[in-house]
Amino acid sequence: MLLLGPLLVPALIRVAGRLLGDGPVRRLATGNAVRNPRRTATTAASLLVGVTLTTAVLTGLATSRSALSAEMDESNPLDAYLTALEEPLPSDLVTRVRAAEGVADAVALDGALARIGDQVVPLIGVGERPAVVRGPDDLTPADGVVRLPWRVTNALDREAGRQLADDGTLEVVVGDRVRTLQVQEGGGWGTAGLVSAQTLAALTTDPVPTAVWVRATDDADPEDLRGDLAALAGPAGAAIAGGHQERAWVELQVDILTGSVVGLLGIAVVIALIGIANTLGLSVLERSRENALLRAMGLTRTQLRRAMAIEGLLLSLVATLVGTALGVAFAWVGVKVMVSDVVGGTAMTLPLGQLVLVVLVAALAGLAASVLPARRAARVAPAAGLALQ
């Protein structure tokens, strides 16, 4: 790209100049911008490299954030959950949980204490998908199925004579009722077992409040939320856990990386601003007699300043658009090479808002860089041009 710059950049500037409209000022600015192709390409290169790197990293981070979020939704479908250990939960616990700061929603689920092998496991009945569940798994078992966390099934396998049957079934005992259920392993909802509402009704006629599942707000502080829920869970005799803290930690790391990239963009913009200002300043010195003659022919100070502003805008805009296109292409390659191998089925995510902001900031940098050269050019007296004729 840098080798083709003297050919490609001026051609793109001419195209961009036509898109800005017609008129003598626009034609003057476009002609001045491409008068020295090598200098123009070199000036645009500094901004192009910065925008390319920034766009590539921002796009890669946005894609990684989406992939990680989907992965977190799958592995941690609940932000927090309070599960009864030995006694039923208070009936008003879900109301107090909903009132806690950082809680978007909470649902109470009935269940019963079941005996599975030598273990006493809380059994939760789940009907339709609870509103607090994240991800593709709605945590609703089919009838005749019990979903057990890996910790419980591993413990069953370690007990002599308590292994699962060859067909993957086991006996679940609630009170004096026994049912043979198909076992599905999973995780993300604690140490309880999950059954359908119909299966729970077949095991007990007196279900009691057994769990409260929680969905956190987007801005919830993980430490404060856990502390508030722990204060409610302790007196209720409930165990508390969830994936909100892990999710918040992962998002924090991505936010830190994004902030670092924005800082790099600021440095790139400053470097590009200095380069564009130097180029325009040099052009003012080289074209001082030409500018004086134009002023003598009727070009106003405002029109001259506008021509310099358009020249700086064209330089920065072309470099930014080309850099954005290259950055997206490099990000696509990076996603295919690095992210897709870690998280299967990852689709590239374009952070359109951030990319538009990059283009606007870089374009405004070109305008800002033209302020001082334009003021210097506008000071040229028209009489100087006449004296040279």
Image: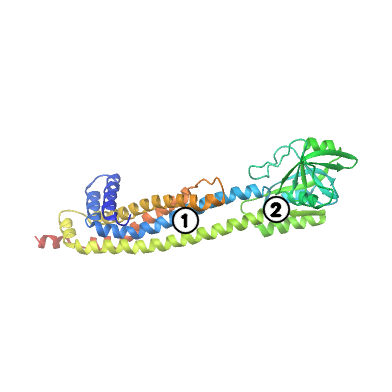
Instruction: Look at the image and tell me in which quarter the N terminus lies.
Output: bottom left
Element carrying mark 1: helix
Task: Between residue 274 and residue 345, name the one nearer to us.
Answer: 345
| Left or right: where 11 falls relative to 337 | left
Q: Quadrant of residue 124?
A: top right
In the rendered image, which quarter is residue 306 located in? bottom left
What amino acid does circle 2 point to? Gly
Say whether residue 296 is left or right of residue 134.
Answer: left
Residue depicted at x 82% and y 38% = 180
Q: Which residue is mark 2?
A: 242
Residue that badge 1 annotates = 57
Q: Position of residue 382 (x, y in %)?
A: 16, 60
Q: Position of residue 141 (x, y in %)?
A: 73, 39
Image position, residue 331 (x, y; %) = 45, 52
Label 2: how many Cα within 10 Å (few below 14, some 14–19, many 20+) = many
Above or below — where is 290 with respect to 329? Answer: below
